[in-house]
Image: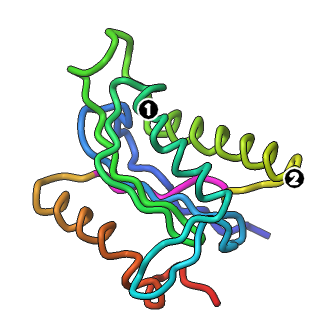
């Protein structure tokens, strides 16, 4: 019996350390609503795991000087990031890949959440992540607006669960 072939997660032959903007979505394990609650007219109220996740978003630029977090939102069961890899802003070392940035982020948040909430070995995030390479200003603005409006449209979100 031949197993179905998995769809590639990444664009073939693309250098994910390239100078440019990237849109990333990271989902919680089993899409559990562990990061925040959305109240009122789309106002995210962070839970302890969401506070840690947000703090580590702020640490990405310290860990990787070549990377700028241009915009983000922490949703109940996923996180959207708009990242920019800027070779001119680096330390002279090769730029990190998008995978190494997201891998460090997921590892760090998971480790901190498990330590603070006393849940050792608990998986916080789904395997992998979704990425989109931003190709032009129109694409950039569309994604910026999507991130900005995501909490307002939580009930219509493809990641929404009761």
Say what secondary structure mark 2 lies in: loop
The quadrant where residue 109 appears: top right
Q: Is residue 121 left or right of residue 145?
A: right
x and y percentages locating residue 18 in the rendered image = 29, 32
- Residue density around tag 2, few if under 14, some if 14–19, many if 20 or more, within 10 Å: some
Say what secondary structure mark 1 lies in: loop
Q: Is residue 39 left or right of residue 5?
A: left
Residue at horizontal 53%, vertical 33%?
Answer: 100
The N terminus: image quadrant = bottom right
Where is mark 2, residue-wise?
Answer: 119
Where is mark 1, residue-wise?
Answer: 97
The C terminus: image quadrant = bottom right
x and y percentages locating residue 89 in the rendered image = 25, 21
Q: Is residue 150 magenta?
A: no
Placement of 28 over or under 127, stated as above or below: below
| Residue nearer the viewer, 54 or 18 | 54
Q: How is the image coloured?
A: rainbow
Placement of 58 over or under 143, stated as above or below: above
Placement of 120 over or under 49, stated as above or below: above
Q: Is residue 131 magenta?
A: yes
Disc 1 and disc 2: Cα gap in Å?
A: 29 Å
**Residue numbers of the magenta segment:** 127-133
Residue at horizontal 20%, vertical 68%?
Answer: 142
Q: Earlier in the sequence, mark 1 or mark 2?
A: 1
Residue at horizontal 20%, vertical 20%?
Answer: 88
| Residue nearer the viewer, 10 or 107 | 107
Q: Is residue 112 left or right of residue 157?
A: right
x and y percentages locating residue 158 in the rendered image = 48, 82
Comparing marks 1 and 2, which lies closer to the viewer?
Answer: 2
Residue at horizontal 39%, vertical 49%?
Answer: 11
| Residue nearer the viewer, 130 or 116 | 116
Q: Residue furthest left?
A: 137
């Amino acid at each position: 019996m031949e197993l179905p072939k998995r769809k590639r997660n990444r664009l073939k032959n693309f250098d994910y350390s390239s100078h440019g903007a990237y849109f990333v979505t990271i989902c919680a394990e089993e899409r559990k609503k562990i990061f925040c609650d959305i109240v009122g007219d789309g106002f995210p109220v962070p839970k302890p795991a969401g506070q840690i996740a947000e703090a580590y978003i702020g640490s990405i630029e310290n860990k990787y000087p070549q990377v700028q977090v241009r915009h983000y939102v922490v949703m109940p069961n996923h996180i959207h990031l708009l990242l920019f890899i800027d070779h001119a802003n680096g330390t002279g070392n090769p730029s990190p890949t998008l995978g190494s940035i997201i891998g460090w982020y997921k590892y760090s948040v998971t480790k901190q959440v498990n330590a603070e909430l006393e849940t050792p070995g608990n998986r916080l995030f789904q395997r992998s992540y979704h990425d989109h390479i931003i190709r032009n200003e129109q694409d950039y603005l569309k994604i910026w607006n999507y991130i900005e409006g995501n909490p307002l449209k939580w009930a219509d979100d493809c990641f929404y669960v009761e």
